[in-house]
């Protein structure tokens, strides 16, 4: 009997040494685990745009307005355009791919100001097609984000070779057409600025007050305003 117990002890020791499961793991396996549901992830908002996005506080202001249930990231690229015929199309910038990799739930696109450069007026007819490509690229992501397009603030001077009249008479209507074609919300920052050149630092780039106005307009488009609202983007 003693020899049998000794042999059994040796067999058990050999099995334990050969097994990849540790005593600690075996204990965890045998003991019941409590099930804790995962925390809900914040709603990811990608702010896509040019220097009005990259160099202003609008994205951070939007984060403050939306609160901790949202995560707002700035993917602006100074000097970028909608048109693919410029020296700096947004779709060819690393930030465009970064915005896609972010797997956003909401995409806010504020582009078009730099398309008012005089040398780009010849490509005006292809503006909407190029803009639709940007929208479609985001809509086709696995995260199936909801897209907003923004009617950018007015251009109050042409010291940077940006034509205010061409912008208001061509670019803004094109952006509105894209919103209608794609059936996505258009955020009217252009009219929100009105004639307030004092909302800009240099006639183009927003001051802190101007950035706050942009953020407020975008916030209103994302969040419900009352019980009857049917166009809000909040889940």
Image: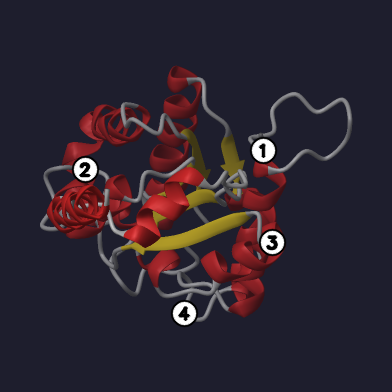
The chosen color scheme is secondary structure
SS type, badge 3: loop
- Give the foreground label among 2 and 4: 2
**Mark 2 Cα shell of 10 Å, populated few (<14), some (14-19), many (≥20):** many
Does the CB distance between marks 1 and 4 fall below 8 Å? no
Mark-to-mark CA distance, 2 and 4? 24 Å
Mark 2 and mark 4 lie on one chain; the one further toward the N terminus is 2
What mark, if any, has residue 83 been given in the picture? 2
**Residue at point 69%, 27% (across, down):** 231
Q: Is residue 77 visible in the rendered structure shown here?
A: yes
Mark-to-mark CA distance, 4 and 3? 30 Å
Q: Is residue 203 left or right of residue 26?
A: right
Kindly identify which residue carries mark 3: 67
Mark-to-mark CA distance, 1 and 3? 12 Å
**Mark 1 Cα shell of 10 Å, populated few (<14), some (14-19), many (≥20):** few
**Mark 4 Cα shell of 10 Å, populated few (<14), some (14-19), many (≥20):** some
- Give the foreground label among 2 and 1: 1
Kindly identify which residue carries mark 1: 234
Q: Is residue 26 left or right of residue 59?
A: left
Kindly identify which residue carries mark 4: 202
In the image shown, does 120 or 1 lie closer to the viewer? 1
**Quarter of the image that includes the C terminus:** top right
SS type, badge 1: loop
What mark, if any, has residue 100 been given in the picture? none
**Residue at point 35%, 51% (across, down):** 102
Q: Is residue 154 visible in the rendered structure shown here?
A: no
SS type, badge 2: loop
Residue 170 in which image quadrant:
top left
Mark 2 and mark 1 lie on one chain; the one further toward the N terminus is 2
Residue 13 in which image quadrant:
bottom left
- Give the foreground label among 4 and 3: 3
């Amino acid at each position: 009997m003693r020899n049998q117990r000794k042999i059994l002890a040796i067999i058990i020791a050999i099995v334990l040494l050969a097994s990849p499961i540790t005593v600690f793991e075996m204990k965890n396996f045998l003991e019941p685990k409590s099930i804790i549901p995962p925390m809900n992830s914040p709603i990811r908002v990608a702010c896509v745009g040019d220097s009005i996005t990259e160099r202003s506080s609008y994205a951070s202001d939007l984060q403050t307005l939306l609160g901790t249930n949202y995560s707002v990231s700035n993917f602006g690229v100074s000097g970028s355009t909608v048109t693919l015929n410029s020296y700096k199309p947004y779709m060819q910038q690393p930030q465009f791919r970064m915005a896609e990799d972010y797997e956003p739930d909401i995409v806010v696109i504020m582009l078009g100001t730099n398309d008012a450069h005089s040398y780009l007026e010849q490509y005006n007819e292809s503006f909407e097609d190029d803009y639709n490509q940007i929208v479609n690229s985001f809509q086709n992501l696995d995260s199936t984000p909801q897209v907003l397009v923004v009617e950018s603030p007015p251009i109050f001077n042409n010291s940077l070779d940006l034509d205010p009249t061409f912008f208001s008479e061509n670019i803004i209507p094109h952006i509105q057409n894209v919103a209608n074609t794609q059936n996505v919300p258009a955020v009217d920052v252009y009219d929100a600025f009105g004639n307030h050149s004092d909302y800009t630092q240099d006639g183009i780039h927003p001051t802190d007050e101007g950035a706050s106005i942009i953020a407020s307009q975008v916030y209103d488009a994302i969040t419900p305003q009352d019980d009857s609202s049917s166009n809000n983007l909040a889940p």
